[in-house]
Amino acid sequence: MAVSTIDRSALQQGAWVSLVFAVPFSIGSRWVADHDPGSPWASVLWLAALGGFTLGAGIAAWVQRTGFPLLHGLVCAGGTYLAAQAVFIVLKLFRGGTISWLGVFFTFTVVLFAGLVGGGLGSALRKRGMMPSSQRNSRPVGEPDQLEEGGAR
């Protein structure tokens, strides 16, 4: 059996987080930019969407079990962005709008960077011993908890 470098479950968990946190802010940013071009809120919402992609990438990197956190962060953020953007592009073309392909590409590169940052954050959590609860080793019976007094190792 071949060993896979991609943990699909981790990508799925990170993608759901990205979709929940990044896409609504992205839609809000687009709406504000279309209705009030001079508003600073478009940039604020865009940065919040970028934070959502970073969070999702961090989750994917944190829960992965293959030892490639940065790859999971990049794939999660980039894949989620491309999937959501594909839907937005189809809807815009269906309504007769035009697409700024340079804008799509630029935003994709920024989202990939956010994925790299999220992957690094997820990796840092793992290196500091902060593992997802589903991956923690169970303690032998009678061993004190690390948080209890005198239980520090």
Image (spheres, grey):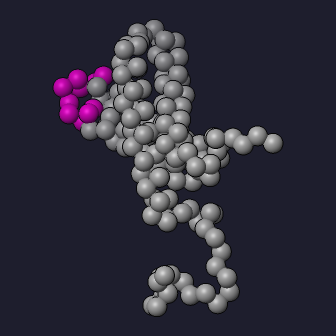
- Please determine whether, in this image, residue 30 is positioned above or below residue 130: above
Choose between 4 and 13: the one closer to the eye.
Answer: 4
24 to the left or right of 17: left
- Please determine whether, in this image, residue 54 is positioned above or below residue 126: above
- Please determine whether, in this image, residue 146 is positioned above or below residue 77: below
Give the residue drawn at x 49%, y 36%: 74
Q: In the rendered image, which quarter is residue 38 located in? A: top left
Q: Residue 90 at x, y = what percent?
A: 53, 17
Q: Residue 115 at x, y = what percent?
A: 44, 39
Choose between 125 and 67: the one closer to the eye.
Answer: 67
Choose between 99 and 141: the one closer to the eye.
Answer: 141
Give the residue drawn at x 40%, y 20%: 104
Q: How many marks?
A: 0
Q: Is residue 25 magenta?
A: no
Give the residue drawn at x 76%, y 40%: 2
Q: Which residues are magenta?
A: 34-43
Q: Is residue 38 magenta?
A: yes
Q: Residue 149 at x, y = what percent?
A: 45, 90
> If the image is split into quadrants, where does the N terminus sit?
top right
